[in-house]
Every structure is written in structure tokens, then in C-alpha cells.
Image (spheres, coloured by chain):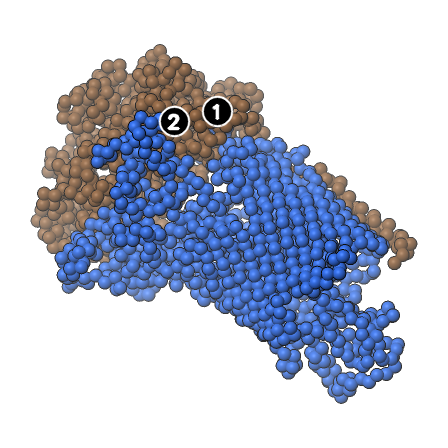
Amino acid sequence: MRLGKYTIKTIALWAIAMLSTGAGLSSCKDFLKEEMVSTITQDYFESEKGLDELVVANYNILRWKYGFMEGPFLFETGNDITEPLDNAWATFSPAVWSPSGAAGEYANNLIGYYQTQLLGAYPIINDCNKAIEIITERAPGRYASDAAYANQKLSELYFLRAYAYYLLVTQLGDVPFPLKSNNSLPANFYLPKTNSATIYAKLISDLRFAEQYLPAAGQTQRGRITRNAALHFLAKLYLQRHQAAAFKSYRNAEGNIDPTSPNAYQGLLYKGEGVADLDSAIYYSSQVINSGISLASDYWDLFAIGKGNWSNETNSEIILQASYGNNLENGRYGMRTNAAFTADYRNSAWNIPSWTWSYGLLKGQGFLPSDWGYDVFTDKINDSRFEKSFQLEYQSASFDNASQSDGPGLDYTDAKNASLTWQANEADFFNVNIKPSYKRPSWNGRNALAGQRKIGTADLGLVFLENSKETAIDISEALAQPYVLYPRWIKDNGKYYYRKTGADRYSGNAGLLLNRKVRPSSRKFIDPNRSTVDNHFGTRDVAIFRLAETYLIRAEAYGRKGDYANATADINKLRSRAAYKAGENRAEVLARLYPGAESLGVEERSYPYSTASATFDKIRVDASYWDGNSTKSKAEQYPPEANTELKRFVHFIYNEYSREFNTEQVLYEGIHHAGIQLERMLHHAQLASSRTGLWSRSDNPSGVNGQDGNGKGTFSATHTFKPFPQSFISMLTDKDGVLLDETARRSYQNPGY
Amino acid sequence: MNINNWKRLSVVLFASFQANMVLAQQSVSPIINADLIGTLLDARTNKPIAGATVQLDAVTHRVQTDTWGRFSFRTGQKLPFKIIVSHLGYRSDTLVVQRSPVEIKLQPNDRQLEEIVVVGYGTTKKGDITGALSQIKGQDLNDRPIANIVQGIQGKASGVDITSNNRPGGVGTIRIRGNRSINASNEPLYVVDGIPISASEASIINPKDIASIEILKDASATAIYGSRGANGVILVSLLEGKKGQVSVQYNGSLSLDQIHSMTDWMDSKALLDWQRQSHINGGTYTGKYGTAPDPDFDIQNFGGGETYGIESIRKAYSWGADGKVLLRDATPEEVARGYAQQVPVYNGGNLLNQDWTDLVTRLAKTNNHSISLSSGNEKSSLYLSAGLLDQQGAMIDQDYKRYTTTLKGDVSPRKWLKLGISMIGSYSVQNYGMADNSSNTGGKDSYGQALALMPYAPAYDENGLLLNTNRTGLSAHNVLLNIENSKNENTQYSVLSNAFAQLNFTPWLKYQLKFGVQYTGTEKGSFYGPDYTNPFSAVGTAPLIGYNSHNKRLSWVFENMLTFEKKWTDQSLKVDALQSSQENRSNGINIRAQDITFPSSLWYDLSANDLGIPMSYGTSFSKSTLLSYMLRANYALKNKYLLTATGRWDGASVLAQGHKFDFFPSLALGYKLEEEPWLKQVDWIDQLKLRYGVGVTGNSSVSPYTTSGTIAGAAYVFDETQYPGYKSSSMPNADLGWEKTVQHNVGLDFGFLNNRISGSLEWYKANTKDLLLNRSIPPVLGYNSILGNIGKTSNSGLEISISSKNIDRPDFSWNTTLTWSRNREKIVELVDGKVDDVANGWFIGQPIAVFRDYVYDRLWQQTPEDQRLIELYRKIGNITALPGQVKIKDQELVEVQPGTDGAKSITLASGETVTYLDNGFGTINDSDKEILGSNRPKWTGGIVNAFRYKNWDLSFFVYARIGSSYYGALQTYGRRTETDVWSPDNTAAAFPQQTTATFTNYNAARNYTSGSLVSLRYISLGYTFKQPVLDRLNIGSLQVYAQVLNPVIWGGEAVKIGLNPDDVNGWDSAAAAQSGGQTANSILLRSAVLGLRIGL
């Protein structure tokens, strides 16, 4: 092959080659340019629309407690009325309660470990700071032209940021307190903690700004922050600041605590003092109370929800709520906690073989009341909140997969009915002692027949009796009920048994450290509109602030000023609503079997168990409730530390919180900030407490797992705050970027961890 | 095909015309201007040699042998002729031919150095390689039926670690020389005939179409791929038509696969006894007859609260006519054991033993058929093939079908021009099996879910129909019901097309233009029927939910390459210059709908749903581009000193502005000692080549759009209306650049004793810096991590591959091929230098994924010493320990005198006061955790032994993966037959006692164990039919073989307790493995294979 021969061809070939190469070269710069198509950058927030949407995103902090399991684990563990079903959590096992244990992990999630999934306070604080900076420094569009609009949005952001910090301070005490946004990697991770006095002062001043510019209730979209929300929040913060004022001496001159001091936790509670914090609390709570909103007339109206019906969400008592839409597009898990507080009520022994829409779902690690959670209702017969808070009775029910709807329970003659069969002695007892006055229509006056199924369509299937050892039900009576009865205490020939399982005629044990998924559970958050019957993507709103709490805040403030008259007036607002109204029906088991039911009239104890007259007088509160001597006062079971009238009054307030806000993730905040968490836990929460002999001893103690009268846990002052997560602390540096040494880490960590 | 066969073909072709002449042709006599015809055979195997050159001495006239080894000349001379016969891989021979036709036998040349191997952007002679690479030839790859190329490579190449994936259609993971990247990808680059494809699509290639696979391992070999070569490169060369041949090949095999459980599971009787004993041990047994079985207790605790389960338990008892359980007197021995005087009549043997795993498995058939045609002449060549893989899963809900066609051809219409195209079309349908379980616990597939069911839970009702208990009781998640009510189909269609034009300007300068394009579409469809029980309650897999997604990926690469190649007397130079642009673009769409109206419509009519709206939908898009320039020079001096230098500039769109481009150089030197005169005299040394290479490669395998601060949707609801909200999602990083690896490689290639023993030795060290690392940052900053160039890792290792011909006789041969490699992977630096990242589980000096946990010490005993220690733990750390349970390692108890500095005192119930050093004893916290090991093996190796006796072939392959840790010794505890559990009589037990008692449970620490395994991968026996037989059958060549795959596995404790540590797919990160991902891996998939190879 000789070159010359190919000259023309070669030139042509070269030309083609260069052209094709050139095609690749000419667009070199453009070729590697990354165009955002499905992704947008943060520059978007500098526009009016982007800023609006950034504000909207920050509202997700309001869902933090309910969007996943962090809320219950942080706010329902460590209060005396609810227990995690996980024993290690409930007993405050060191395997869980350590900076690298699950408690540390949940604290990490509060801080913002799952930033990408919106779970966490600091990512939202950072976005709030960003939005506040954009509004105040370089406002776009309407934010520049419409001052009222800008101030309203600013107020919403101040509120949301304050709420995020409030969650942090409640769980961790002093925390880092950035008020500027962070948009690039800093040179060091020097993140010192700020004294909570400084934090509270700033939150209060932000909220006082906000309350001036926020719209009144009903004047904005439901779900938006209103003036009432800011006022209520202010009252709460002022009261909390006062509650811890007495702990000033446990902080040193620099405002720090000595982590080795046994009172370190009280020092951490101290949040500074204002000139007249109690008066401020009364002033702001009164503004809410006088703003024109009112309590729900029936306690249950706050929670009643049906398939396709969310009417409870518009109740005027609600001041602030975590909003969830009626479809299923509600963040990562929807309203997740609807499946956190339910009992495992499935068993064909009582003719409810599967989950149903209307009775709800238990999914994953759950939370059920402690015994004290029931017994704090000192008058279960006359305070309707007991029946309205807990699912005391389950009617037989079924679920139809094909139509995806709840169905009635099987008829007792149905061959597939697998409920318990009557045994001869039970049938005899029933026919003689119970049947004559048993007027339930579904029962239709039938005789019990040995060998026949007990529970038919619309009959009661599973029923709970929360009695005491003194009021234990006799085993023969318990067995003869026309349903499966789970009493807390039964007696048999002079022996007293604690929480035997009813499904096996009281041969197995439950409760305390043993399987305890079957007991009365909260019915407040059951969501028949969740995604599927065995899934938890819920749709219901949750009230964060409601007027009942405003009343209790004001009542406590009055009481702390010695004004018990005004305090009882506010408390009785709730009591009046809590009482049964004349004509209102009670639960069957309340009227028939609960201790105290014998005081009811014969008509009241017969179907439909209608209340003859309003019960408010029976539960009306007066100062004798905390005098330390009266029956009423003793029934409140104040801890021994409550040795003054004021202390008993404060405990009474939180007993009332316990009755009013069960499973609403509110009580924890109250007893924690009031500084009475430790004594209440040790006195009331048997699984958490290390005290012995405080509880009634049973004849079925199951080694040390059952009711032997002793506490099962290791709760201590340490556990009133969460540990800073190990992984977080080990990243921290000093100003020079040098990692904290062991001493510095220890002094950063909360006391006892 | 051999010459005899060609004769037969001639007969077929010509017989109809001139039957007599055919016979006459067989005895041509020497004449002038004679035709010389003949055949060329391998002297050792007597098989025809195709493509060899036959040349008349002193004349330029040359011909090539065809498929049947046949050649023919028309000469201008008369016999005898002097001819020269040469062929790659054979010793050239010069001989005098006396007559025609002639049969010539050529001795194989064991000097394989002349063989051609594929390197990046070109080929080179094996003897001239300067980098580290492994070659696997097509026939070695296909020595057993394999579904994809990854499976074929396992154990065949040193430095390549591959784990298995048994799901039909699944591809194992492949790691070349360890992991370098922590967050960026560690997947190697696949290049098929010069066109890069994504690793996930490696399964589209029919392994039967592969001529060879070259695995480039060191930087001097991979630097030519610049930014994409950091994780090694797998070059796949497809078969092509050979000059002067037409051949048809058929390969077929039938495999029978069956799951072999490596674990002995407890039957119903044993399991109930175990569970009851657990209650007795824990003090929670409340039976009414002492410790004797009590029907009420059993039903309440094990019956599941549902009729079928309860009835099943009742079967173990005898019942009287009055419905009461029958009682009997207990024996004195039983009473001594805690039985009451009167106990129920109980016989666990009457319990149902539902073999759930048996119900979900089958003897699965896999058909693998492939037919190919290849043809070639001086001007063109063509290769066509079609393949079918029809694979049933050993689980009844899994299968995979793949159809492939391959076309490869080239034409040289002029001497200066060559054009070619190759195309692979592939279509596959995978029935994935039951819903993917993305949670950390629970069965990963139908087999795992079957294992979760109790043997006393029935699968069928009394009428023999599938039992549906409406998600209640023991049979709540009847796996058969779920299989029947779920369908998960993955469809993939892919076209890979690659065209080139090569222009030869001069003999020393050529230009090549290449354009390759790959289009892949994947479709996923899933539907769950009304009775699906949704065992993991995933929101997308509830009953009556249909899902459909379509994803498309289009990628193209466009290359211009100019090659200069010139040889002088004792030096040669080759320079390649390349410009290349690549683009990957993918987009997708998906819809999910619930309450599908007509279950029969599956996911094909999602709008027919009762709600009238989809449940969710979305579209996606991503695009990334890469622009590269490359220059490479190969220089050889005196055929002794070799040098390769490359430089590549790469720009990647995914990186930050100003950091997109970078330069990746490499240099390699080779020194062929065997060419030195002083070594040439040593006649047993055939090759001794020393190599050194160093180079830089890059990695930019991060998702697009990660460098600019992104935002993410965070909507909120006002007035029940969803309002759009957006939040900051990732912290901007304007400095994100390339992750770079500098790798040194020293290699020695050797061949001794006439190449009876040959192989290579490699040592390497690869240092990776500027890791693309998602570092944790304190969330107080508003973000929890940021992707940056932080930290360093290193990998160093040793690789040995040796082949030896132990025996080499005409009738009997024995060859051994051995590969062995070890790799030490470690993190050298992280954030702020020497700081461990505990949150992510990264530790300096350790492999990237390690197990860090409490350390198993021993089991607690009932001795007074232990009772005292237990009380101390209770008092100091609130830790409840029980005899028979796991004690983990803690600081030693150091008792000191009261008043000693740092001492604490505590008083026991006995009144004794213990004063101890507060050294951490008594509390269990993070500081008690230690690094326990890694799931990376210490070394891996494979050895193939192949024997040939006359027409018989026997080979077997042993694969070893040694020194890895495995988490899971307690995964099957409680269900497997485990006799070595603690009891007061067996205090030296290996495993803790089962108990329902509540205590501070550290038993999980007992899960860590040795994952070493040695596996006999296959034994294969083949028979090649003798030519006379084939002639009678009118077939060219015929080989039949039978194989057994995976007959045996040996190993450490993991294997001994019935686990197979090999398949860790999806759970290869230590964190995930720790969460219990490997529960289902108690099986070994065994197969029997029958196969047939026919050549026409």
C-alpha cells in the first residue's frame, strides 16, 4: 500500500474524522453542564413562592410527635400513666437508656438524624432561620410590599422554631441554640450548649412578637398558627419558667450545673425567672379562654371519628393541631401513632379474629396504660373520661378481605364461630344469677347451654375490668359472664390473682413483665381511615394545644398564687364536661361489674345503662381534694414527697392532666417541667420504679416477673432527661476544630449518662 | 468437525450428482499441476485445526484451513512439495509432502505467549502485557451451565471476589481487589466489545456468545478507562466468525435444581417441647399438672388464638367423650422431673408436621439452549447466535426466562476500510417471587417465610383447600396463599448495538470511529390479590394493590481513535489517541393504585380502581455525561524491554463546576528476562517476565445533582388540602471532585518445563484518597451528612495463579489450575484524620464494613462465684443476668482495699461489702464493644482439576472463601435442632438456654462466628464421541456431559450449624447483616446437569 495512491481519499477521510471528532469537542463545556430537571436548588427559596413553600415545610415540626414512633418513645416513656410494651424500655434498662442505646438513638432522631425524612428539630430550625433571614434581609415579592403578610409569616416561623426548641429543651435540657442558618460546612463543630434560661427568654420574646401579628381563631386556614396558639404557648412557657424557679440554687453562678450533683437534674430544669411569670401565665391563658372558643360539650367529640368522617377535627376547643389530610399523602408514615396505643384485641376466643377498621391496629412496639393510668380515674363510674379514653369493651366483629370492610361477628350458632364454649358450671351460674337482669338485645334472653358458643353477633366479646385486690371479682362470677372477661384481680378460694388471661379461663399470666398486650387501651387515636386494615398510615389530626389545657395552666397558676377558688373554678369547667350527662349511656361493664356500680340505680344498671341524672356533683372538685386527709385526697394517691398543700395541689393538677390527656403526649411535658417526674414515676409506675412493697401482692407472682408488689425498674433522676447521643457528642470539637476530650464530653453529656 | 466429517459432507453434497466420482476423489495420484488437499490435525487430540496457515515454501501463495482443518492448493509444481504450516498456539512445522490428500499433525506449542489478549482499546500479545489482568476463555467460562457471566467468573480469576445470588435472574456481586469506596460505587466497569454497559445489565449477555473475558485489575491496565477504571474493568469479547470457516454449534443443557436444607429443623413435637421448656426455665410455666404438658397452657400459648391452630395443638392430647382431656398416672421418674401425679395423656408424635419448606420448593428444571452459526472469509465474517435460558426457581414462585440473539459481523470492502457491527438483543422475564421484604427481619423470600411458619400450623383446610384464616392464628401468613395471591414480574428488554468503521491510511496509521448505543427498558408489575396477607404490612403490598413502573435507560458512547503503529528492527512503537463522549440518560414512570376493581386485570388497568384515583404516581429523570481524551504509547525495545504509558483526561458532569476535569496517568514497565541470552540457556525456563505498573484511576460514581444544595418536598395540610412545601435537603458542596486511587502493581509471569507449569504472581497496593464520603455531621448544623472528598482507604494484596500440566500423555492428561488471592482492605483516614466514625461504623485500620459489638465471653454459670458476680452486675449496672445466658466481656472485677483511689463499694444481700476499682466493671456500654471482624474473607481460592482419559473428561472445581466473620449463629436458634444448649447438666454448652424469663439480654453477641467455607462447586464428567461413531451418525462433533453442582460444602461454625455463608446478597454491609438479614440462608442449591454439545 502506497500513500500517494490514496491522497484524495485520505484527505476526505481525514476531513470526516476531524468533523466527527469536532462534534464531540465543540460542545465540550455544555456537554458536561448539569441541568437540573427533576431537582431544584435552594435558590428557589429566594423567590416569593419558594419562601411560601419553605414556611409550609417547617410546619412539619408539628407532626414530629405523631409521624413516627419517636413521639411515644420520648413523650410516653417516663410518664407514670403509660408503659412501653418493650420491657427494656419500660424498666429503664441500661441497655436502652444509654447514649449509644435506643434512648440515645431516639434523642438523635429528635435532634435530626433522619434529616432527609424530616424527622428532627434542628433541620427545621435551620430552615426557619433561613426563612427568617430571607424575610428580614432580602424579602422577595409580597414579603417586601405587604408588611402584614411578612409579619404573619415571620410569626409563624417564630412559633415553629420555638416549638422545635421547646421539644429539645423538654427532652435534653440545655441545648445548642443557633439562630442563624447554616449553609456550608463550618471549620469546626464547636456547638456549645446554651442555658435554657436564655432559650426560654428568647422563645418568649419571639412569641410575644408573634401574637401581635397572627390571625385570630377561625380567621385563617385550619392548621395554620393562630394568635391563640401563640398565647397558649406563652402561658405554658411562663408557667414552666415559674415551676423551676425554685431550682435556681442548683445552677452555679455561670448558669451551669454540676453533673455529679444529685440535684443536677433539677438544676437543668431551671429556666430563669421573669418579673411576674405566674401573672403572665394567667394573663395569656385568660386571653385564650376569653377569645370566644369553647370546650367541646362532650369529651368524646374531640376524638370521635368514623369511616369517611373527620368532624372531630374542627372542634373549637382545638387551639393547635398536627394536620393530616384525609387522603394518604401525609409525609413518610402518615399519622403513624394511631397504631401505637392499641391493644392486641384479636382472638377468635372472643369472636374478633382479626384487626378491624373501627377497633384499630397495634403495629410494632406499642404503648399501653400502666395500672395507675387506669386508677388515676378515682371515680370510674362518674367520670366519663375513663370510658371515653379506654376501650373497655369490644363487640364481636370481623373483617371482610374481599370488600375490605368491617363485618359483624359470627352468630353463636355459626359452625365457624370459635368463641369459648359454655361449661356447665358457668352456664348454671349465668342462667341463675346474670340472665334475669341481662337485657342486651343481641343476647335476646337466651339461656346459656353447656357446649354452646358464648359469643354471637353484636354480643360483647372482650371486656376489661380494672378492679383492685380489695374489689377482686370471684372467679366463678368472672367465668360466667356472657363474654370473655379480663379482670385485673380475681379471687379463688382465698387466693388473689393478678391479670390472669381470660381467654384460657385464667390459667395463664399476663401483666407487668409478662405478655401484656391485652388490656384496656386508648381509643383516642384509632383511625378507621388508615391506609389498610393492617397498616398504620393514618389520616387523623392530633390536637397539640386544646382549651382544656389552657384551663389547667391557668388553674395551676392561680393555685400557685394561693387562689384555690379560681383554680377549682377552672378545674370544674373540665369536670363539668367530664361528667355523664343525664340520659347518657354507660358502658355495660361499668354499670354492671365495676366497683362502685352498686351505687347506681337498678335502671342505670340495666340495658341500655342510661344515666339517670348528671354526675357532675359527684366529681365536682373542691380544696379537700388536696388537703391530705379527706377520702378524696387519699384517693388521689399523692407521692410521699407531696407533703404540703401546694405540692399536693400541683400533683392534683397533673392527676387531672392524666385523666384529661391520656396518650396525647402532653402529660410528660407537664410533670417534667413541674419537677415532679421522678417522684411520680417512683410512686406510680411499677415497671419503672425500684421501690418495693408499694403494690398489692398476688398469689401468682411468676417468679419476679409478675405481681409481687415490687417495682421492676431502675428509674432515677438521670432518666428525667435523655442522653445526648454518643455519635453526636463524639463529633463535637472545640473552637480550634480539635475533638472534645473525654472530660469535655462528659461535661457536655446530661447528668448520669 | 474434523476431516472425516468433511468427507461425509462432501458425500452429501456431491453424491446426488456423481456418486462414483466421490470415491475416485479419495485416491488422487501425484500429477503435475496437482491439487494438494489435506487436513491438519492437533497431534495431541486429533481434532482438526481451523484457521491455520499453509504455505508453499519459497512461494507467497498461502491458504488457510477451514473449520474441518481442510486446505487445498492448486500448485504449479509437482509432488513432493515442501510446505510450511503454522498456527497460533502450535509449533510451526516445515515438511515435505509426498502425496495428496495428506494428513498433517501439528504439535501444540505450550508457549502461549503468542496468544492475543484483549486490553482496553485494542489487543496485545500475551507475552507483551505490562499490566495485571486475568483472562478467562469462553470454554472455561462455560464449563458448567451458568446463567450470567458473573457466575462464570467465580473462582476462576485471582483477585476477584464474587458472592452468589441464587434467585433466578439475579446477579451476584463482584469486587475486584476489594472495596475502595465507602459511599461511591465499587462495581467494576463492564465493557462489551468496547462499549461500556452498566453492571446491573451484565445479565443480558448469553455467556455462550463469549469468546473471552479479560479482567483488568491494576491501574496501569485500567487507567486507560480513566475515571471509570478504579474498580477494575471486565472486558467481554464476543465470539466472531473465523476466516475460512462455516460452523454451526449447538449447546444444550438441562439442570435439575433443588434446595438442600443444611439445617435440621425441629419437628412439631420437638418444637413444642422446646417452647414449653423455655417457659419452665423462665418460671412462666403455669400448667396445671406440674411440668407436664397442659392442653390449656399449650393452646393459650402456642395455639395462636384461632381454630385451626388450636385444633392442631389439641391433636397431641387424648380427649374423652365429655370433651375433657384424658389423664393418666405419672411415672415416678416423671414425678421426679416435676410432673403432677395425674397428667394428661400427651403424645407429641400425633401433632401435624407440616413441611412448609417442602410446599414452597420443587425440583426445578433449567433449560439452557444456544445455537450459533459462524462463517468467515478473507473479506468478511459473521457470527449469529440465539440463546434461550428457561430457569425455574427452586422456590415455586420464582422463575426466569431470557431470550438472546447476537449478531456480529464485519466487512472489508477495500483494503483500507473495515466496517463492522455487533448487536445483542435480549428479552427477559423474571417472576421475582413474593413481595420484596425490605425490612431487616423476616423471611426474604417464600422459603424464608415458610421457615417462619410453625410445623404444627396447617396449610390446608379439611377440604384440602388452601387455608385462609383471615390473617389470624398460626397460619395467618399461609405462604401458599400469599404465593397464589401475589405476582411480581420484572421484564427487561435491551438492545446493545455497536458499529465501527476503521480506515487504514497507511500501514502504520489507522483511524477508528466507534459508536455504541444501549437501550434498556425495564418494566415492573406487581399485584396482590384479595387474600394476600401482607406479612410485612408494607403499604405498597396490601391486598388489591397494583403497581406498574417503566424505566428506560439510553446510553451512548462515541469514540474517535487514531492508532500509529510501527516496527523497526529491534524496537516498536504504538501510539493510540482517543477522544470519547458518553451520555447516560434514564427516565421512568410509575403508578400504584389500590382497591383494584377487577383482580384479573393485575396491573394492566390501574384506572379501574374503586377510589377513582391512583394511590401514588411519579416520574423520574436523570442524565450524566462524561467527556474524555486519552493518549497511550506502547514501546518495546529488543522485544525485551516493554513500556506502556497512558494519560487520560476525564470530565464528569456529576461533579462540581471547576472540579469536573481531571487527569489520570499511568506507566508500566515490563522486562522479559527470558529473552536475555544468559537465561535463554536455561532450557526449563520458557518465560520469566517482571512487570511494574503504577497509575491513577478515578471514581465519580455518585448520583447526579449531588453537588448543589438540593431541596425536597415537605408538604403540609391546611383545611384538609395539601399545600406544597419544600425544605433544604442536602448541604451544597461546591468543591466535590474526583475520588482517586493510586495503584502500584508488581507482577511476575512465568513458564517452566516447556510451559508445563505457568502462571503469574501479583502484588499490589492501591491507595485511594479524596473518598467520595458521606460524612456524618452534627444535625445541629441543619443537615446530618455532607458528601465530600474526605478520607483515605487502602487495599493491598497478593494474587497467584498457576496452571500445571501434571500429566500429559496422548491418552491421559491431568491439568490443574489454581487461583489464590488475598486482599487487605482498610480505612486509612477519615474525617479529621485519625478519627473513627462510630455513627457509620467506620474505623481506621479496619475494612470498610466491620462488625463491632459486644464480645461473647462465655455462658453464666450457677457457681457461687458467678452468682456473686451476677449480684454485683445487678447492683452496679442494673443488669439482670441469668445462669445459662450469655455473659459478654466487660472490664475485669478488680477488688481493692477500701479507700483506694477510684474505688467504689457496694454491699451485697449477704452483707458482704465489695470494694472494687471503678474501671468500667459492672456497666455495659459502648466502650465494651469491640471490633469483631469483617465479612470480607482473609483469602479466596479456586482449584480446577481436569483429567482426560481417551474420550473421557473428568473435572472438578473447589472454591474456598476463608476467614470471614458471619453474623447469624443464633438466627435459626429456637427452630433448628440444637442439642448443645445450656442446662445445669450441660454447663459447657455452646449455646444459651432457652427461657422466657426477663433479663438484660446480651445473647445477640453469640451470633458472630466463622463464615469460612470450602465448596465443591462441581464435578463434571464428559464423553467426546469417537469420529467413526459420529460418521455413522452424520454429525461433526458430539460431546455429552453430566455434572453435579454444589454437592458438598465444608466450613466453620456457620456451616456446621447449617448455614451457607456464601449468599450474602443484599446484606453485604455489616450493618444490614447485623440486623438479621441472613435468616433465610440455610440452604444450598444443588443441581444435576445433563448437557450436550454438537458441532455440524
* Residue A733 visible at all: yes
Colour brown belongs to chain: A
> What is the number of the mark on residue A452?
none
Mark 1 residue type: Leu
Which residue is found at the position 46% from the left and 53% from the top?
B1011
> For the point 55% across and 40% down, which residue is it?
B827
For the residues tagged 2 and 1, is the chain the same?
A: yes
Secondary structure beneath label 2: loop
Work out whether residue A677 or residue A21 is closer to the camera in this orientation and state it: A677
Q: Quadrant of the N terminus of chain B?
A: bottom right
Q: Which mark is residue A750?
A: 2
Instruction: Give the percent coordinates (x, y) of residue A195.
Output: 41, 19
* Residue situated furthest bottom in the rendering: B20
Estimate the x, y position of residue B757 in percent, counting from the top left. Answer: 65, 62
Q: In the rendered structure, find residue A191 and report the number of the disc placed on it.
A: 1
Q: In terms of depth relative to the viewer, which is nearer, B6 or B523?
A: B6
| Mark 2 or mark 1, earlier in chain | 1
Q: Which residue does the image show at 72% across and 82% down from the upper left? A: B11
Please state which amino acid type lies under the numbered disc 2.
Asn
Q: CA distance from mark 2 to mark 1?
A: 15 Å
- Chain B: colour as depicted: blue
Query: Quick one: SS at disc 1?
Result: loop
Q: Give the chain of mark 1.
A: A
On the image, the x and y values in percent for residue A577 come to 24, 28
Q: Quadrant of residue A233?
A: top left
Density class for disc 1 (Cα within 10 Å; few <14, some 14-19, many ≥20) is some
Numbered-mark total: 2
Residue, x 27% and y 62% (percent of image)? B351
